[in-house]
Image: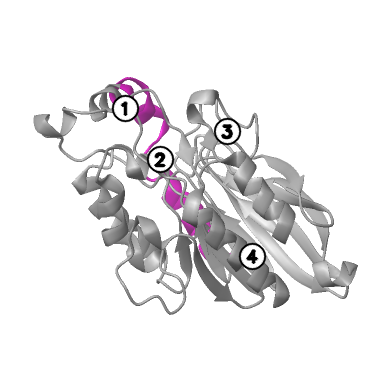
Amino acid sequence: MFRLAHFSDIHLGPLPAVRYRELASKRITGYINWRRSRRHHMQDGIAERLIADLRHMPHDHIAVTGDLVNLALDGEIEMARMWLEALGSFEDVSLVPGNHDAYVPGALDRACRAWGGWMAGDGFDRPVDRDSFPFLRRRGPLAIIGVSSARATAPFMASGAFGGDQADRLDALLAETGKEGLFRVVLIHHPPVRGATATHKRLFGITRFQQSIRRNGAELVLHGHTHLPTTHWIAGPEGRVPVVGVAAAGQATGSARPAAQYNYFEIAPRNDGWHVRLTRRGITGPTLDMADIGCEEFTLERRDAAA
């Protein structure tokens, strides 16, 4: 059995000191939003409570699907690097960036330089940049494929994009690892499902992403962005593929959104496929007590078993 933990949308705080020149961009609207609302709901120490809980659970790998920061300030990116170091080694943690990590032009490049060790595929010996995605990591029976939907957008927009060369490479990686019989987990920040979020927050390239899954298959897609614990299904070659979101790891109690959670997957092979048990662990009240929030189980058929 392989145990995979999934975190997203940490939105680490508090914000470091902000210089006026750093606000001469989209950041000014984000800063106002942080001061008025987000800082009260995304609180320092919440994510650490989840991680402390995970330390008591057996786990083989951790997936993080983006939005480590808020405004992608240089100080935030460095703080996130230190947070990742505390979370786990390059080998034990896989990361894809989110829209807040690419909040303004140039931010994604800085994030890639700072966090590249957690976003580098197996055997990748060059500096990680925006063209390094998708990456492939083989961990036990899993093939972890990291896709980047992160991009800088205009004020009041939080959309992502998928397509081009990245889409072609995803096709190739899914086909290759499918032939190996691996359990393929695709990481992406924005949900690749229609209607999963508001138009100004959507993923451009949903059709292209779903076509790749329909042609080549995958066993699991993990995303963040919505701050919601959801399970959607999209079409694969022989059956449906689960697309699983998670509540924001930095979310305090008392908000309209669910308080902080993480997903805990137990993945076991079967003769004809895989059995997956998903447990959602989260904060249950202002004292930060942890408990199982919900549980789902599903069986996935191997593609070669269906042939």
The segment highlighted magenta reads: 33-57
Give the Cα separation between the discs numbered 2 and 4: 24 Å
- Name the N-terminal-most of marks 1 and 3: 1
Q: Position of residue 187 (x, y in %)?
A: 55, 55
Disc number at residue 174? Answer: 4
Determine the CA span between mark 3 and mark 4.
Answer: 33 Å
Of circles 1 and 2, which is in front? 2
Contact between labelled residues 2 and 3, with CB atoms less than 8 Å apart: no
Determine which of the numbered discs, if any, sits on residue 258 in the image.
Answer: 3
In the rendered image, which residue does mark 2 sit on? 99
38 on left or right of 164: left
First reached walking from the N terminus: tag 3 or tag 4: 4
**Residue nearer the viewer, 107 or 95:** 107
Give the structural element (helix, strand or loop) at label 2.
Answer: helix
Which mark's residue is nearer the viewer, 1 or 3?
A: 1
Q: Position of residue 176 (x, y in %)?
A: 64, 73
Where does label 1 land, which residue? Answer: 34
